[in-house]
Amino acid sequence: MKNSFTTLVATVIAGTLLAYMFCYQVRYDQVAVRTTFDRADASSVQNTPGLKWRLPWPIHKVTHYSKRLQLLEDKIEELQTADGKSVIVRTFLTWRIDDPLKFYVTLKDPDEAERQLSSRLREIRGVISRYRLDELVNLDRAKLKLSAIETEARDALASSLAESGYGLQVESVGISKLVLPEATTEKVFETMITTRERLAENALQEGQAQASAIRSEAKSARDRILAFAERRAQAIRSEGDRDASQEYASFARNEEFAIFLRKIQALEQMLDHNTTFVLSADSLGILDLFRRDPASPAPASRSATEGFEGGGR
C-alpha cells in the first residue's frame, strides 16, 4: 500500500516536471516568442491563447509579452514657450507591442522599451516649446492648441519608432499636467488685468458714442417737432388774424349792432340750461337792452321789453 502511494506521488511529480519541460501556456492577453537555440523567426510567434508544446531548454526558450496597452509617464520638467513664458509640464504616452518578433530581436525587455520611449518623449517637449502660452492655457477652447500638439507629437514619435524597427506602436501622446510657475502666474494676471481694462475702456467708448448718437438724434427729432409745431401755430395765428380782421371790419361798419350782438351772446351763455338769474336792472350793462330809453319812441321800447319777457318765459 505504501509502495503504491509512493509510486503515485512519484508519477504525479514526474508528470508535472515533464509538462513543465514540454508545455507552456499562452494567456488571452499575452503573446509568446518561442526561440530555437535563441534564434527566432516568423514561426516563433504564438498569438493564440492555450497550451503549447516545446522542447526542453536550451533547445526551445519561451518569452511572454503583454498585449495590453501600457502607460509611460515622464517626470515633471520646466520649459519655455514660444513667447518666453515658463511652464511646468508632465507628458505621457500609451504604447503596445505591435510586432513581437521585431521587439524580441531589437529590445527583448519591456524595461528597455520604456527607456527608449522615455528618451524620445523628452524630445516631444520641443514641440510644446513652439507654441505660445495662450495656446496652452486659455478660457476660449477655440484658441487652445493642445489637440494639435498631441497629434503632432504622436505622429513624430510614431515616425521615429517606425524608423528604429523596434516593433512598438504609440497609441497616444498627451500632457497630463501643466502648471504655471509663480512668476508666470503674476505675468498672466497682469496680462488679464490689462486685457480687461482695455475691453472695459472700449466698451465705455462705444457706450459714449452710442449715447452721443442717441442724444443727437433726439435733439434733431425735437427740433423737427418744434419747427413743425411753430409753423402750425403760425398758420393758426394767421388764420385767426384773418378771421378777426374780417369780424373787426364787419363790426366797424355798425358798432352799435356789434355791441348788441355781443350782449346777446353773453345773455345766451348766462341763461343756458334753464338757468334763472335774479339781478337788478342797474347791475349789468347787458340789461340796458330792456331799459326804456327816454329818447327812443315808446312803442319800440315796449316792443323790446315784451320780446324779452316772452323769451324769459
Image (cartoon, grey):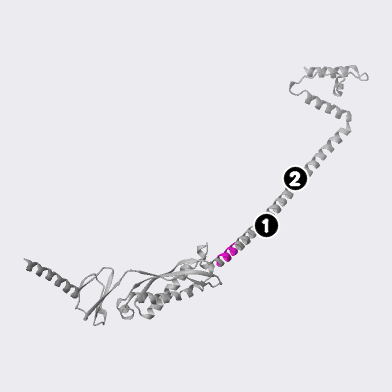
Point 79% across, 17% down: residue? 310
Where is residue 44 drawn, in percent x and y? 25, 78
Quadrant where the image shows the C terminus = top right
Q: What kind of element bears circle 2?
A: helix
Q: Residue furthest left?
A: 1
Q: Main secondary structure of the magenta part?
A: helix
Q: Is residue 27 above or below residue 220?
A: below
Point 80% across, 24% down: residue? 267
Where is residue 155 drawn, in percent x and y? 42, 74
Looking at the rendering, the stretch of residues picked out in magenta corresponds to 184-192
What distance separates the C-alpha of mark 2 from that of mark 1? 30 Å
Q: What kind of element bears circle 1?
A: helix
Name the quadrant containing residue 200: bottom right
Dot placed on the residue nearer the N-terminal end, 2 or 1: 1
Residue receiving disc 2: 229
**In the image, which disc is placed on residue 209?**
1
Q: Amino acid at mark 2?
A: Ala
